[in-house]
């Protein structure tokens, strides 16, 4: 898989441009709150950089990178319901890459997760997907689990309609507004939502609440220890306000899950794109790694670069992160 397959350059650039515009217009006014580390709650943090008027800091205790001072929740809610970049994603960007994503992202991810659960002797019967989008991942996963059914939680009315058509039970709402799913899922999933949420502890606590005792929580997101984010810093397209606010470290994911009452926390980074992402950025900013000749040489050769990507994935050094954790029985 290459970055351009799931994020074609022209669509990505337009999406980034609209997001930058939203960041400056919709978030120009209003109070911002200094927040402690979103993973471990430490106040021991240092400013890292600023992007499009949004500050990011790094926790000195657990290494998590996060956006602070943070605009208030109401502004983000307005932004997700009513902004040009969110509209562009839902109506233009996603539909054009939907089938490519099903093949390259959702189907293999569902297959791998089903295998991981089987290896742990677990056969889920009710899967809740929080931020289910069009229901693609949920349908790929449920199709691989014998006798399983799905519940989709998704605030977008357009996207929830696709979930309904797929036959899933639905809740058209944000996770924090859903009150009747406590203990319903023996597997509660959430893909690529954690990096967006205003309050990660509250979000993971909601996932834990939807989980039956002895069940599992699974989420994917972006991690601060990943190669592309570490090397590119504020130049990383993934560091993307007002959309992407939270990049936890491997340690931070563990701490956060335990704070939400989960146990048996496993953090994996099976990412495939870090090297491709850094190479693509180097074509825009060739001087970026001038002080890093070793990394430049490593990325220059296709064979070495591919082997390096595998090394990153195997050593929890890719930014694409999977977290699997258990709710105590
Ligand atoms: Zn921390």
Image (tube, helix red, strand yellow):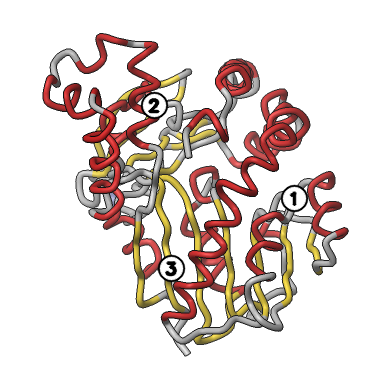
The front one of 153 and 28 is 153
Residue 94, quarter of picture: top right
The front one of 46 and 7 is 7
Residue highlighted by disc 3: 324
- Image position, residue 295 (x, y; %): 17, 27
Residue highlighted by disc 1: 134
Whole-number angstrom distance, CA of label 1 to CA of label 2: 27 Å
Taking the image as shown, residue 51 lies to the left or right of residue 129, namely left
- Which label sits on residue 270? none
Residue at (12%, 19%) from the top-left corner? 293
Residue at (72%, 23%) from the top-left corner? 84
- Image position, residue 210 (x, y; %): 62, 73
- Image position, residue 290 (x, y; %): 17, 13
Q: Earlier in the sequence, mark 2 or mark 3?
A: 2
Residue 43 is at least partly visible in this image: no
Residue 157 position (above or below residue 126):
above
Residue 129 position (above or below residue 102):
below
Residue 143 position (above or below residue 186):
above
Tell me if mark 2 has few (under 14), some (14-19) or many (20+) residues whose alpha carbon lies within 10 angstroms of its own: some
Q: Earlier in the sequence, mark 1 or mark 2?
A: 1
Taking the image as shown, residue 183 lies to the left or right of residue 172, namely left
Residue highlighted by disc 2: 236
The front one of 39 and 273 is 273
Residue located farthest toward the bottom when viewing the structure as drawn:
329
Q: Earlier in the sequence, mark 1 or mark 3?
A: 1
Taking the image as shown, residue 142 lies to the left or right of residue 157, namely left
């Amino acid at each position: 898989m290459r970055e351009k397959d799931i994020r074609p350059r022209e669509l990505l650039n337009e999406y980034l441009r609209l997001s930058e515009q939203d960041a400056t217009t919709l978030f120009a006014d209003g109070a911002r709150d200094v927040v402690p580390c979103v993973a471990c709650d430490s106040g021991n943090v240092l400013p890292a950089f600023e992007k499009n008027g949004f500050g990011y800091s790094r926790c000195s205790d657990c290494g998590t990178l996060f956006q602070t001072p943070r605009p208030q929740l109401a502004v983000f809610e307005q932004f997700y319901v009513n902004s040009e970049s969110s509209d562009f994603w839902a109506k233009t960007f996603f539909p054009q890459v939907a089938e490519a994503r099903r093949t390259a992202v959702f189907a293999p991810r569902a297959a791998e997760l089903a295998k991981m659960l089987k290896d742990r002797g677990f056969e889920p019967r009710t899967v809740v997907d929080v931020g289910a989008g069009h229901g693609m991942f949920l349908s790929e996963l449920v199709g691989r689990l014998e006798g399983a059914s799905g519940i989709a939680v998704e605030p977008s009315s357009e996207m929830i309609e696709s979930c309904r058509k797929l036959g899933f039970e639905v809740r058209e709402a944000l996770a924090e507004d859903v009150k009747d799913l406590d203990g319903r899922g023996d597997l509660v999933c959430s893909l690529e939502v954690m990096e967006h949420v205003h309050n990660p502890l509250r979000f993971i606590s909601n996932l834990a609440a939807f989980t039956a005792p002895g069940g599992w929580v699974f989420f994917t997101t972006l991690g601060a220890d990943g190669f592309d984010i570490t090397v590119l810093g504020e130049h990383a397209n993934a560091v993307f306000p007002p959309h992407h606010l939270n990049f936890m470290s491997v340690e931070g994911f563990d701490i956060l899950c335990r704070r939400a009452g989960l146990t048996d926390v496993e953090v994996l980074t099976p990412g495939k794109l870090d090297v491709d992402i850094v190479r693509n950025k180097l074509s825009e900013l060739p001087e970026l790694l001038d002080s890093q000749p070793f990394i430049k040489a490593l990325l220059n050769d296709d064979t070495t670069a591919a082997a390096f990507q595998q090394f990153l994935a195997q050593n929890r050094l890719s930014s694409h992160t999977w977290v699997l954790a258990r709710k105590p029985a």
